[in-house]
Amino acid sequence: MPDVLSAPLVVEFPFTRSLGPVQSAFLTGLRERTVLGVRTGDGRVLVPPVEYDPVTAEELRELTEVAATGTVTTWAWNPAPRRDQPLATPFAWVLVKLDGADTALLHVLDAPGPEAVNTGMRVRIRWAPQRTGAITDIACFEPHESEATAESTPHSGEFADPVTGIVTPARLDYTYTPGRAQSAYLDALSQQRTVGERCPSCRKVYVPPRGACPTCGVATTEQVEVGPRGTVTTYCIVNIKAKNLDIEVPYVYAHIALDGADLALHGRIGGIPYDQVRMGLRVEPVWTEGARHPDHYRPTGEPDADYDAYKELL
């Protein structure tokens, strides 16, 4: 039995979204050191503003300016900041109800230690020196001795050069441990073999194996070598080039039912023009030297599989 594998993985992508009039005014206001909320039909002021009342679903458009000072309503100390968090030194996550607002804004508080933070303390915004129209234009909150004020003033939401869209990087760092079944599967791939596991109840062979049958819910341990050839059951044509992936577009990604398997796996199709790939195409893996998995699948030259032979695997 091979050792159970483990590897660090990172999933990262830029999340791009356009802004409606309310969010555009809010973020543009931050760039201009102005905090805007939105007033609901019953007179509450929501900060950050939303486009629809969370209680009544009424569309909201009445913008109002609130103060840059406020009161901490609750907090949690963060002793070890992570990558790309607002402050590099220990800080408190805080919910702050700004003066003139009826809801709290989540941000960070720059404080020397947890003993310096308490619910009810007064704070103010520390603005970032360079502002672009993002929540990070608020660098953080800092302690501030002041009396609470409850006034808010109407605001048109109009600014020169409004922010109309934002790009937010999303990143997830984690350690992936595939477990016994998939570790055996990956070990077999490094030997240019494809191994699945058979359910002792329904007798289906699952590739990649999951360690348990998803249909019957029973453990699987019987290994079954499948393929290496298989059949394209369905596919898509990729027209957008992925960052750091040295494959020219367009190319085809397909679900492939390997001979002897009862579950289709996915792989890239090569060795054939993208517009000639089809359901039922018979393919085989192509390995590159030193690779731990197939680089792609190519046509075998066999006649296409009959639809009835793979329809249950679509």
Image (cartoon, grey):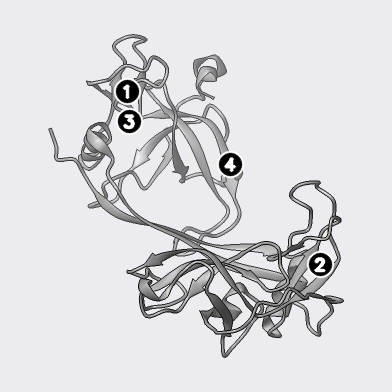
Q: Say whether residue 182 is visible.
A: yes
Q: Amino acid at mark 2?
A: Pro
The answer to which of 299 and 85 lies nearer the viewer is 85
First in sequence: mark 4 vs mark 3:
3
Task: Mark 4 or mark 2: name the one nearer the start of the chain.
Answer: 2
Disc on the earlier residue, 4 or 1 = 1
Per the image, the residue denoted by label 4 is 236
* Residue that mark 3 sits on: 228
Residue at 53%, 26% (x, y): give it.
280
Image quarter for residue 178? Answer: top left
**SS at mark 1 in the image:** loop
Q: Is residue 122 above or below residue 234?
A: below
Looking at marks 3 and 1 on the same chain, the residue that comes earlier in the sequence is marked by 1
Of marks 4 and 2, the one in the foreground: 2
Q: Which residue is depicted at the point 38% across and 67% down?
A: 78
Structural crowding at the residue carrying mark 2, measured as other residues with C-alpha within 10 Å and reported as few (<14), some (14–19) or many (≥20): some
- Is 91 or 173 nearer to us in this picture? 91
Q: Where in the figure is residue 214, as x and y percent of width and height? A: 40, 22
Q: Amino acid at mark 3?
A: Pro
Circle 1 sits on which residue?
212
User: Given this view, does label 4 or label 1 mark the residue nearer the observer?
Assistant: 1
Which residue is the site of mark 2?
A: 21
